[in-house]
Image: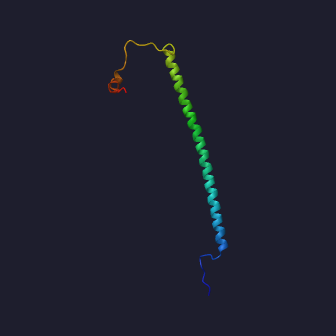
Amino acid sequence: MKKKTLINNNPLKLRQYVILSILIWTILILFLLRWDKKRMDVEAINRAYIYTKVGFDKDILYRRWASDHGGVYVPILKKRHQIHIYHILKTVIFL
């Protein structure tokens, strides 16, 4: 009486399964790489937009500040407000 074995002794079948597994794995990896590259491109565009908007807002803020003071050149005040940086001035070492 022949025993039923769970292991397939046909090497051609095994070879087909291995080739099919490698092919599916390769397609999966290529799909994931393409998806990740597309996501990174979108993220780069979004970051560029945000940095551009921040720079533009900074320029507008500076222009408003300058125009509130009568132009690019701000008049010198008689009283200097350097109390908040006095501790830094004491520690400055000139080389």
Task: Tell me the residue at 53%/20% (across/down).
Answer: 63
Coordinates of residue 56 in the picture (x, y in percent): 55, 27
Task: Tell me the residue at 60%/83% (across/down).
Answer: 3
Q: Which of the 4 image quadrants contains residue 38?
A: top right
Q: Residue furthest bottom?
A: 1
- Quarter of the figure with the N terminus: bottom right
The colour scheme of the drawn protein is: rainbow
Task: Tell me the residue at 33%/27% (across/down).
Answer: 91
- Image side of residue 33 versus residue 82, left or right: right
Task: Tell me the residue at 54%/23% (across/down).
Answer: 60
Coordinates of residue 65 in the picture (x, y in percent): 49, 19
- Quarter of the figure with the C terminus: top left
Q: Who is closer to the viewer here, 88 or 1? A: 88
Coordinates of residue 78 in the picture (x, y in percent): 38, 12
Q: Which of the 4 image quadrants contains residue 40?
A: top right
Residue 56 against residue 67 in the figure, above or below:
below
Residue 66 against residue 19 in the figure, above or below:
above
Q: Which of the 4 image quadrants contains residue 21?
A: bottom right
Coordinates of residue 27 in the picture (x, y in percent): 64, 57
